[in-house]
Amino acid sequence: MAGPSIDALGQFSLTTGLGPIGRAVNFTNSNEAMLAAAVIILGLFAIGLKAKALVPGRVQALVEVLYEFVHNMCVDTIGEEGRRFFPLVFTIFSFILLGNLIGLFPYFFAFTSHIAVTLALALFVFLFSTGVGFYTHGFGFLKFFVPSGVPGWLLPLLVPIEFISYLSRPVSLSVRLFANMTAGHVMWEVFAGFMLLLTAGLGVFGAIASVVPLGLNVALAALELLVAGLQAYVFAILTCLYLHDAVHMH
Amino acid sequence: MSDGPEKTAFEERLQAAEDAAHGPKRKDPGKSDAGSAQRAIELAMRLGVEMVAAMVIAVVIGWGLDRLFHTKPWLMILMVPVGLAAGLRNLLRAERKE
């Protein structure tokens, strides 16, 4: 077909970044965005914590709010033991949050829109919380799959159910983040492509009519900003919940 | 540095200023309408995937066992209600944790 067409999934294709060096080691644009997210977090903290002022400035206040938010989330959800897992939860939260946020900007790549990335993160959380469970309770952690207070003849039915429910955690964790980010970016692309199609098909009238998808995209941008924050929060709080289960076994 | 009386005086003035700005501080901000609506959205975003994920895992396990034991398709069929139950279990657990 001549003229513009809607290519909603092309934005997720991987290319190599960083010029010839990146091409030699397969350093992709997704890796570039990850690196950018990490550098932004570290830079923000380096700048924010340099002042060490009693009355914080703008950057320091932002950093402190972020820190306290995640710290409270850890302690509220996991309990006092949550302090030990704060570095992990904070790293995951800030990495996903920054990944979601910089993915919203033009020329940046939303690395959280790839299931390979989110599944790797979710599997790490899953294996880590399972490891914490076995480390804390030894083989007693297997009792987690045996609900207390049920008659013995129901156990052959309930243990597989509990086990599958446990195994489904990394799937739901990764699919939720991946699906939300991908859906948002696809909708953006579809509406933007629709504007091009209208203009190409209907001329001046189409250009005027394309104000409607433009307005939808503006509204969608606000929604995507909300989703970016919310999904990072949900991922972090579920990490906390899984660690709570591993530590307290109920 | 003695901050005893000045501090309480400052706290009082701060309280008065806050009351003047927003009215008295709400004791439980979590119970407000906006807070509960936001929590409902979070919950809704989580629950849909929870059910499907359990079903997918159950069916994949059943399919794998079928391949292992050459019992196609019976174990997979058997695992579908188990996956459904596990999905409901996920929902109940997520709801209880709130």
Image: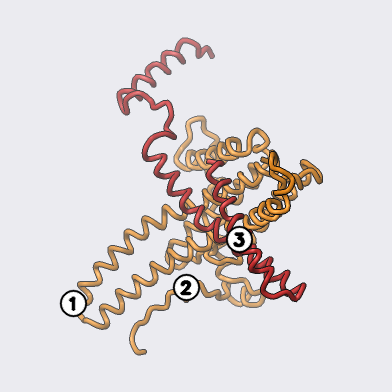
Chain colours: A orange, B red
* Amino acid identity at mark 3: Pro
Numbered-mark total:
3
Left or right side of A207 for A166: right
Question: Residue drawn 43% across and 62% down?
Answer: A105
Q: From the image, which quarter does the C terminus of chain A lie in? A: top right
Q: Is mark 1 on a helix, strand or loop?
A: helix
Circle 2: element type: helix
User: Residue A169 at x, y = what percent?
Assistant: 62, 55
Residue furthest out toward the top: B5
- Residue B59 shows in the view: yes
Residue A43 makes an appearance in the image = no
Q: Mark 3 points at which residue?
A: B81
On the same chain, marks 3 and 2? The answer is: no
**Nearest to viewer (mark 3 / mark 2):** 3
Residue on which the image places disc 2 = A11
Which chain is home to disc 2? A
Three-letter residue code for mark 1: Phe
Residue A113 lies, in percent from the top left, at 52, 65
Q: In this view, does B36 lie to the left or right of A166?
A: left
Q: Nearer the viewer, residue B72 or A250?
A: B72
Q: In this figure, which residue is indicated by the disc labeled 1? A: A205
Same-chain check, marks 1 and 2: yes
- Check disc 2: other Cα within 10 Å, few if <14, some if 14-19, many if 20+: few
Q: Residue sitting at 70 percent across and 49 percent down? A: A154
Query: Which chain does the numbered disc 3 sit on?
Result: B
Q: Residues within 10 Å of mark 3 (few under 14, many from 20)?
A: some
Residue A84 versus residue A15: which sits nearer the camera?
Answer: A84
| Left-right relation of B98 to A81 | left
